[in-house]
Amino acid sequence: MIQSVTPFALTPFQPIFGKNYIKLVSYNIRFGLGTDQKIDLERIADTVKDADIIALQEVDRCWKRSGMTDQPEIISGYLKQYHWLYFPAFDVDASKTNGDGSIINRRRQFGPMVLSRWPIRMARYILFPKLGTSNDYNMDTGAIECIVDTPSGPLMVYSLHLSASSTRDRLLQINRLLEFYRCASVSGGSWTGTVATTTDSDKIMMAAQNWSNGESEPIIPKEAVLMGDFNFEPDSEEYNIMVGTPDTSQNRVVHFDSFVDSWTAAKERSGDRVSCYPDRPDRELEHPLCVDYCFVSPVLSNSLERVWVDRDAVGSDHKPYWIELSTDLA
């Protein structure tokens, strides 16, 4: 039987295998280039291996800087117990012609990745709008929107990377992101509906072709977790769009179709929220920033137990941002 959900319905989480929480992490890995200027994907995998759901950003395929390797395949090889998917938001030619004229077809790609201990029921890929630039490097970025079939129920998860170029870019991209989220319950899953029982020959043929593959249509949960490198700080216009603008009493107005900052809503916070230490090969780490976030939908914020930034990680110029969600919502 196909289940349906109202736009703001929530499937309550249940305890998972004796655990009472789900652990998630977001990590911009900068193609594995650590603060020691060495590329090491094994230490990236080792850093995030305790998470149930992993959101990575800046993952390479076929770049000279990373040895023309397939980083999603390499990372997944270190994390064999995880389902995974990858979205090459940036995708250009990297093909090579052999001496006999045959083509080695390769693409130079860059984008976000999601890994999950549980099946990723469906996914959609969001290519963000980008404004061309003449005096600053700018590139295509995007997001993965996916439904993870946790044992506690379906959970919508995003891994994303907003532009580092300008506020104008990021505002356009946030609007595209929120549009996808707000429309999800209306558009439904990767497929919707069934082929009605009929004597019409075309519909009989459609039913025989088994377009649903014998599966029920994906449930689209309203509750969502957005993780990634947002490239804005907490006092920015972009931040206010995500979590609501403070009113006259300085309380943020949280609308049902917006989000809550996990750092401000969690019952427990460890350390500070600084997540990025831009480095240069010839200088010390400098100008620490808070640009990596985990935003959650309003009802889900009730289950935020703990958040922290792993300050000891050295696999990138960013630090992993961790959250724990209770499986028992208030």
Image: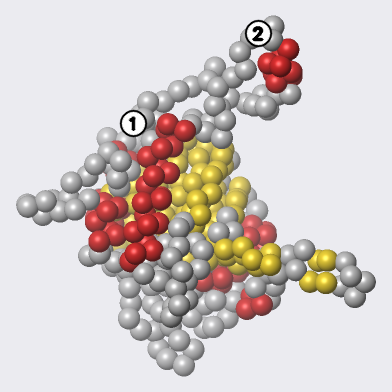
> Which residue, as the protein is rendered here, is positioned at the far left?
249
Q: Nearer the viewer, residue 222 or 184?
A: 184
Secondary element at tag 1? loop
The spot of residue 328 in percent (x, y) is 34, 36
Q: Nearer the viewer, residue 79 or 131?
A: 131
The spot of residue 284 in percent (x, y) is 40, 88
The spot of residue 311 in percent (x, y) is 39, 71
At a point 40% along the width and 30% down the height, the residue shown is: 11
Q: Which mark is residue 98?
A: none
Looking at the rendering, which quadrant does residue 186 occupy?
Answer: top left
Q: Which mark is residue 8?
A: 1
Residue type at the position of mark 2:
Thr
Residue that carries the numbered disc 2 in the rendered image: 198
> Which residue, as the protein is rendered here, is positioned at the far right?
100
Q: Quadrant of the N terminus?
A: top right
Looking at the image, residue 159 sits to the left or right of residue 324; the answer is right
Give the spatial CA distance, label 1 vs label 2.
Answer: 34 Å
Crowd band around label 1 with a 10 angstrom C-alpha radius: few (<14), some (14–19), many (20+): few
Q: Is residue 291 visible?
A: no
Rendered image coloring scheme: secondary structure
Secondary element at tag 2? loop
Looking at the rendering, which quadrant does residue 130 occupy?
Answer: bottom left
The spot of residue 251 in percent (x, y) is 13, 51
Looking at the image, residue 299 sits to the left or right of residue 86; the answer is left
At a point 15% along the width and 53% down the height, the residue shown is: 246
